[in-house]
Image (tube, rainbow, N blue to C red):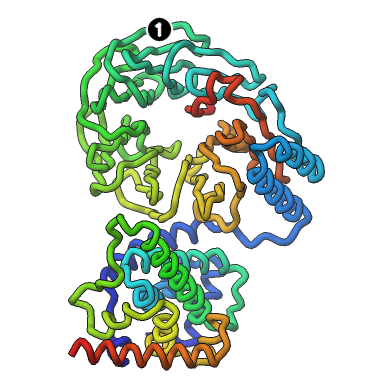
Amino acid sequence: MRELARFRAPGEGQAAERTWAVVASAFSEREPAPRPRRRFVRRALALAAVAALGAVALTPPGRAVVTSVRRAIGIAPVQWALFSLPARGNVLAGAWVVHADGSTRHLGDYREASWSPFGRFVVAARTDGLAALEPNGDVRWTLARPDVRFARWGGGRTDTRIAYLSGRTLRIVAGDGTGDHAVGPAAPVAPAWSEAASAGALVLAYADPRGRVRAVAPTTGRTLFRTAPGPAPTLLAWSDDGSRLLVLDPTRLRLYADDGRLVAAVRGHFVDAAFLPRSRRVVLIRTDDGLSVVSLLGARRPLFPSAGRLGQVVPSPDGRWLLLTWPDADEWLFVRLGGPARVRAVGNISKQLGGGAAVEGWS
Amino acid sequence: MAPSGRDERAWVRAAQAGSRSALESLYRAHWARAYRAAYLVVHDAAGAEDIAQEAFLAAVRALDRFDRRRPFGPWLHRIVVNRAIDWARARSLRAEVEADESLPAAADPPAELPALVRALSALPPEQRAVIVLRHLLEYTPGEIAAMLDLPRGTVNSRLRRGLDALAEKMEDER
């Protein structure tokens, strides 16, 4: 048995460093221990109720239970139409724009769309091309390319670029529709733009076909960093200050600094994640034994456990609300961050927005 | 080597006050034994890393509530070993339902591992856990019973059966 005391497990040293990066990150983001408050009890009740809602949401008797439980604990019943957003800004869902007052506009026959950096324009994709639009649907320019997906518009006041996939090739075009060119082969995930603080210029992150994430400066063509090959990411996102890159794949969440240093890595089954505006904090949806749990990375308590399968998490522009999509129940949930627990649920999303399209952003 | 109780209490107190270097001292002092214990129960490096990482994250989350008069090691090892048992059980269940998929075989540990470690991998996870707690982490049967929430007699019988089975396996290998 003395052999056990001398035993060194495989990969011990590297595992220690990887885990320390994660533990140190969680430590730096931990919150001070809260004192018990009545508010906590109310929130716990609210969260428990929402978990119950998920379990029964799909059947008519279930709907009745949902309504009664919601009433009993003070959560508003499901609104069957989207009358307004709880915060300023406009939501882009598929080819629909939802304004803060609840009014909607269909941009046209596009498969997906996303906002320009200041939310003044929209870039929309269809199978045979790319289009830059006004938020009212007026077309500013179009570009014919095959099988266009994942168009993302980045840049500042004077220089904007649009990165998109045409088939399996990443391409970039200037914001005025000129200078379209190929960058290279890419995996099917939306590229992400940043004005990285240390580079002082536009930086684009994308995944190549081997699952490596590359950060490049399109103006110089320089590769700033490249990660090791791995599973294809499902999400790439920069923090607003450009100092952190979030990379999500089905089993891992990784955070990189803008110099390519891995600053956190967490294993789990992740569905979606996003940076809170003007923050390095990450809000995420993970699944755990069939439950969807919404939490802040490194935080002690979940923000929102649900027995339903949540799809996306999108923070409001002021960072005070989260929009959670709940495709199985055909609902959007608006959950307030901080303060007393408050959940607003809006149903009939697919009927209102032509098929329940994915939310592309709240800007 | 386990840190002195005095050092450990000082690190916990400083970490509770926000000292990252104190947390790192605590982490460095406990990482290797936590990871090895997890590895010896699950016999999978990635699984052991996940389990040890989860245990340390649980420690960070519970830091403010941690009673610093209590030793940190047993609290951490309790989490590690219980999660490792759950992991190993879940894996064996998965292997049954996904028999056509080529899971990395827990039953075939790498040849470069010591004979005792390879023999240990053939035992049920519950027996592996008590042997690891007794002979790697050096807890008494009474302490192990408390950590695993088992009667002391069950711990003793698992130890006895596990060691007998290990001796047989080692004999077979010679």
Circle 1 chain? A
Q: Residue at x 60, y 20 (%)?
A: A351
Measured as percent of width and height from the top left, residue A227 is found at 26, 46
Residue B163, by quadrant, is bottom left
Picture layout, residue A182 above or below residue A242: above
* Disc 1: which residue: A140
Task: Name the amino acid type tagged 1.
Answer: Arg
Residue A293 vertical position relative to residue A4 in the rendered view, above or below: above
| Residue A256 visible | yes
Q: Residues within 10 Å of mark 1 (few under 14, many from 20)?
A: some
Q: Secondary structure at mark 1?
A: strand
Is A284 on the left-hand or right-hand side of A15?
right
Seen from the viewer's position, the closer of residues A300 and A209 is A209
Q: Is residue A85 left or right of residue A191?
A: right
Residue A28 in percent (x, y) is at 49, 58
Quadrant of the image occupied by residue B161:
bottom left
Please identify the quarter of the rendering in which residue A333 is found.
top right
